Image (tube, grey):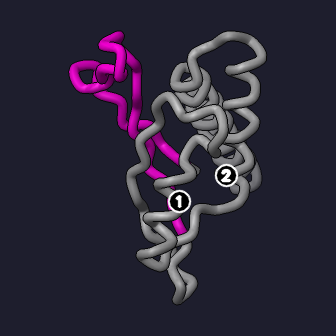
Amino acid sequence: MPTSQNNDNENISQSKNGTPEKKTIISIGCQTQSGSTQNVQVIIGHPNPENHPIQFQMRNLGDKGLTVPSNIVDSLSKIYKLSCENNAEFVDLVEYALKVHQQKLEDQKKENEQKSSETQL
């Protein structure tokens, strides 16, 4: 699952009209042609409404023999749609989704550790 590597000092860029635009960098495990996984960094910013949020980055990764997992592609599409429907920042929603996912993973790990310790008693 992707992880966020947002740095508050580096997460603001300028749009073409000079207004600040928030961005973040996430790490995604992409599939290689040999079937292994390679982590790559992808910039999440303000996509063109006519394109997938990481369309051009996916094309560049594809040129290098890497494929972004379909669940990541689908999730980013859904999050972008929600951001448009609710007039919310796409970057903020991606960061929120990553935090929720990370918390779920941590909760599952604690639950599994607790079950494991109970069975050892």
- Sequence order check, earlier mark of 1 and 2: 1
Would you say residue 21 sits in the magenta stretch?
yes
Write down the quadrant of residue 101 in the picture. top right
In the visual, does 9 lie left or right of 62?
left
Q: Farthest residue in the front direction?
A: 17
Vertical side of 22 occupied by 29: above or below: below
Q: State the SS at label 1.
A: helix
**Which span is picked out in magenta?**
2-30
Vertical side of 25 occupied by 7: above or below: above
| Picture residue at 22% right of the left edge, 20% below the top | 9
Vertical side of 25 occupied by 81: above or below: above
Q: Amino acid at mark 2?
A: Val
Q: Amino acid at mark 1?
A: Met
State how far apart marks 1 and 2 are (Cα).
9 Å
Residue 40 in percent (x, y) is at 40, 59
Any part of residue 114 in sight = no
- In the rendered image, which residue does mark 2 sit on? 73
- In the rendered image, which residue does mark 1 sit on? 58
Vertical side of 21 occupied by 7: above or below: below
Q: Nearer the viewer, residue 96 or 52?
A: 52
In the visual, does 121 lie left or right of 93?
right
| Picture residue at 63% right of the left edge, 39% below the top | 110
Residue 93 in percent (x, y) is at 61, 23
In the visual, does 117 lie left or right of 25?
right
Write down the quadrant of residue 107 in the picture. top right
